[in-house]
Amino acid sequence: MKLHRFYIDHPLDQEFFEIIDEEILHQAKDVFRFASGDNFVLWNGRGREILAVLDDYTKGALSVHSVQSIENKNELPVRLVLYCAVLKADHFEWVVEKTTEIGVSLIVPILSERTVKMNLRADRLAKIAKEAAEQSCRAKVPGIAVPISLDKAIAEFGEGMNYVFHSGPNLQSIQLNKKSDQGSVGLWIGPEGGWSEAEIKKFEYLGSSRKDFSFASLGKTILRAETAAICACFSIAQKYN
């Protein structure tokens, strides 16, 4: 039987400890009705995961002890960074949820020229990412950066091999070179309506002056921005898996 996983902001490096998280306490006591001796998994979203046993309920806490460490091998062997133009809030939240399930390491919201909606809630995005990572049995919760301009994103985060997705002519699908990726792959997804001409020229200049930027295509059809983000991440995850 699959054990339930609880996310907890804790180093999980002690044998005996108490859990005071109200949400975990509610689920363990009132939803799952765990009793002393029941097993479950605790993970901290930073790569640490343990098999734990419930010892007892105390006032406002769970007393537990660690049985063993669990090696979670579900993370991608490459750092996958999604640079996604800010979309409508519900569309961007869907991108966060699904790309987290796929294995993205970091999501960077981009303020592009055609960005219209900028009402993203950092706390809600973090909660969605945590729950998606928990559901998909990941070892880590992806980071979500604050929204930044395209120029700043290129200057601060442009590392490893970067693929800019665009619907222009004569573009090929991703030609992955694991040696040149150097452990990091960046995927750049434009807003509804696509990248502006000025933004495309910036990427073209980068492509001509640097070997780590290139255009790529997801096929002949025009995809919605949120669909493109998910498909692009999956294409990388599939190649590395």
Image: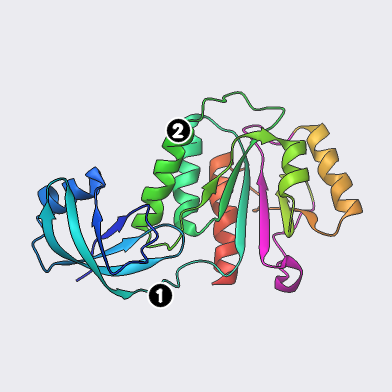
Question: Which image quarter holds the C terminus?
Answer: bottom right
Task: Left or right? Give the position of 20 relative to 138.
Answer: left
Residue 224 in sight here: no
Question: Which image quarter holds the N terminus?
Answer: bottom left
Amino acid type of the residue tagged 2 in the rendering: Asp
Compared to 239, does 150 lie above or below?
Answer: above
Which residue range is magenta in the image? 170-195
Q: In this view of the protein, which residue sits in the foreground, 170 or 197?
A: 197
Instruction: Report the residue marked by disc 2.
Output: 90
Compared to 46, does 2 lie above or below?
Answer: below
Dot 2: element: helix
Q: In this view of the protein, which residue sits in the foreground, 53 or 196?
A: 53
Residue found at x 67% / y 62%? 184
Q: In the image, residue 226 lies at what x, y percent? A: 54, 42
Dot 1: element: loop
Residue found at x 13% / y 49%? 31
Disc sitting over residue 71 in the figure: 1
Answer whether residue 80 is magenta in the image: no
Question: How much space separates mark 2 and mark 1, taking CA atoms?
Answer: 34 Å
